[in-house]
Amino acid sequence: MFEMPRLSARSKPARYRALAEALRSLLAGERDFLANAANTAALLYHGLPRLNWVGLYRWLDGGLVLGPFQGKPACTRIRPGQGVCGTAVARRATIVVPDVTAFPGHIACDPASRSEIVIPLIVGDRLLGVWDMDSPEPGRFDAEDQAGLECLLEILLANSAWEGAPVPQGRSRARARRTDRDRVER
Ligand code: SME
């Protein structure tokens, strides 16, 4: 049985370090990407405060398709350029949205969501999908969250195989070439 690390009294960077250690241990011995993404979503949903949705959208046939997640039922398909997720795909960059009501085209799957972070999952030049997290609190995600989450998602990619093919070690990237913090589409 997996034991959640004790996290509540730690600073944010220390919490992410503890989660990274827990994630490595959780994913050890399993390479299936969807199984590992499901456990990553559960670890983050229960290990981080003030979240109402955590999960994966896979890149399939030119669009995003809902994958493993924690939270309320969500829309199943998102086109490139649509919503925060589709915008992160179009830009190949992490997007932090402090106020979802100020992001034109934001897709409200859960009306409780007030802020959001979407991180593209890229291996080499291949887009695997995006990792999406929502919070009921405005401005929930800061630069420390972005750095911590990108590090956790690199662990997910480095420890998983995608459609049977091993992910090339050392080339996974859950990090943007550029980051569009606080920027909104006009
Ligand atoms: N808010 C996202 C849609 C996915 S849900 O938040 C789970 C978006 O605007 O792309």
Image: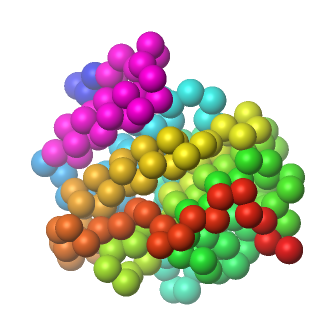
Taking the image as drawn, is residue 113 in sight? no
**Picture coordinates of residue 61, whole percent (x, y):** 51, 86
- Number of numbered discs overlaid on the protein picture: 0
Q: Residue furthest left?
A: 29
**Residue 114 quadrant:** top right
**Picture coordinates of residue 8, whole percent (x, y):** 46, 16
Q: Residue at x 56, y 27 (%)?
A: 49
Q: Main secondary structure of the magenta part?
A: helix
Q: Is residue 121 above or below residue 132?
A: below
With 89 as the anchor, is 21 left or right in this view? left
Question: Depth check: 72 or 183 in front?
Answer: 183
With 134 as the anchor, is 148 left or right in this view? left
With 171 as the anchor, is 76 left or right in this view? right
Taking the image as drawn, is residue 23 in sight? yes
**Picture coordinates of residue 73, whole percent (x, y):** 65, 49
Question: Depth check: 34 or 134 in front?
Answer: 134
Is residue 170 highlighted in magenta? no
Q: Is residue 122 above or below residue 10?
A: below
Quadrant where the N terminus is found in the figure = top left
Tell me where the magenta segment starts and ends, as one range.
Answer: 4-28
Question: Depth check: 32 or 81 in front?
Answer: 81
With 159 as the anchor, is 36 left or right in this view? right
Is residue 18 highlighted in magenta? yes
Q: Residue at x 45, y 23 (%)?
A: 11
Q: Residue at x 55, y 86 (%)?
A: 62
Q: Is residue 77 above or below residue 34?
A: below
**Residue 159 quadrant:** bottom left
Quadrant where the C terminus is found in the figure = bottom right
**Picture coordinates of residue 100, whole percent (x, y):** 79, 52
